[in-house]
Image (cartoon, rainbow, N blue to C red):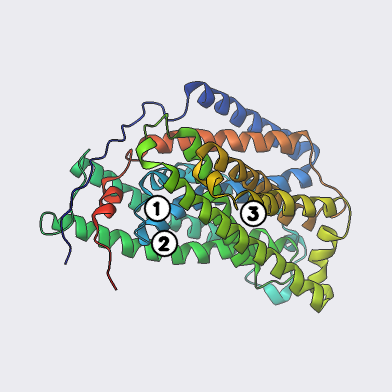
Amino acid sequence: MLTHSAQPENTAPRAAQPVPTWLQAVSAVAAVVGIAAAALGVQQRPLSTWLYLVANFLYFMGLAQGIVTWAVIFRVAQARWTPAFSRFGRAGLAFAPVSMLLFIPLCMGRETYLVWIRHPLPEKLPWLSAGFFFARNAIGLALLFLISWYVLRIHQQGQRRWGSETPRWGQADQQLEQISYRLTAVGIAYLILFAFVFTVVAMDFVQSLMPTWYSTLIGGYFFIGDLYLSIATLIFMAALLRRRMGLDRLLGPEEFQNAGNLLLGFGVFTTGLFWAQFLTIWYENKPVETQYLIPRFYSTPWHPVSWAILVVALAIPFLLLQSRELKRTPSAVAVPAAFVIVGMWMERVFLVVPSLLPGELGFGAAPALMTVGFVGALILALSVGLKWTPPASPLDLALKDVPKLEL
């Protein structure tokens, strides 16, 4: 039987400008510069530009949808310490229109980076056909975005229904229980769809760049890597914005320690999958699989990049996160989170670019400015998303009132 208990009200005020105005202006300029650099790069160095566009699409789309996914995970798990982190997570939905718009240029340049269009493989038809390729990815991502929007809408309705008050569980408010059960059911469906859609994305935008290479691990490795990247992003956002947004009471040492533990755990998990991918190919030593491994791990210039990814994205965060005090200090735990954010961008480039440019990095002015443009677009989207979402959803705050099971 659910009971009543005293619960503090939602004391987190809505910030007028969660992201500083000057940063939004700089981000807008960066986004415009990125678009111009991409247009120029396609004319001058088409292959490398398209490959970095694909890599950036995978990275930033995965980051934005990943933080939304963490908000859903927290809800399904009924995590009591996550109201502020969930608020940051739901803001990632604002990047969805950018992700969908990117399908237009990705479709236009398909013959440059999808070699199977010019040289089709009979054994993989009709799976590797351009129409089905873009349709399945667009439909899958659109479904994720729609469910994410539905979850956000429920939280917005909860904010209008309860305002700054925290609803109570029990006979006093049956509507709260009904909404919570609905959020849990929708969340479970979303998480299953997330794993499926991002597995397809990995197979299409990573594996099919080398259409004769096979991997049954790439899907799981890809979406777990997105979750690793996105929990780091949530920590970084919370450390930077908690005071500006009046969320200090909801983002204390305990909350950052819990998030830091998640970052550590998913870092170990990602490292294990990284090693499993390498080890399986190495000991089988089949040409159909080693074609992926050799240019990335044994040839220049990508061999040093593989070590840099291992150190920056995995080893340094693992070592730093051994410290309990570091995880309890917002400014300190943001450091390993920043390493993960940078290192996972390198890792996404590592997955994509060597498939068609095994002997060169292909990184020049156009890809660099294009990446800066993506950063600007992400910051603009998050600044909008943070205004959409309740300061700290009453539906999340109410979880602190749910009685714990006694075994």
Check the picture and name the quadrant holding the C terminus.
Answer: bottom left
- Amino acid at dot 1: Ser
Q: Is residue 116 left or right of residue 181?
A: right
Circle nearer the N terminus (2, 3): 2
Q: Residues within 10 Å of mark 3 (few under 14, many from 20)?
A: many
Q: Residue at horizontal 61%, vertical 45%?
A: 336
Label for residue 133?
Answer: none
Compare residues 315 and 359 and report the one nearer the observer.
Answer: 315
Q: Are marks 2 and 1 in contact (CB under 8 Å)?
A: yes
Marks 2/3: CA–CA distance: 29 Å
Compare residues 278 and 316 and report the one nearer the observer.
Answer: 316
Q: In this view, does 325 lie to the left or right of 163?
A: right
**Residue matched to label 1:** 148
Q: Position of residue 222 (x, y in %)?
A: 61, 61
**Residue matched to label 2:** 190
Query: In what element is the residue under mark 3?
Result: helix
Q: Farthest left residue?
A: 171
Is residue 136 in sight in this rendering? yes
Q: Residue at horizontal 21%, vertical 45%?
A: 166
Marks 1/3: CA–CA distance: 31 Å
**Residue matched to label 3:** 318
Vertical placement of 280 versus 394: above or below?
below
Q: Where is residue 292 in the image (x, y as percent from the top left)?
A: 79, 65
Is residue 39 in sight in this rendering? no
Query: In what element is the residue under mark 1?
Result: helix
- Amino acid at dot 2: Tyr
- Amino acid at dot 3: Phe
Check the picture and name the quadrant holding the N terminus.
Answer: bottom left
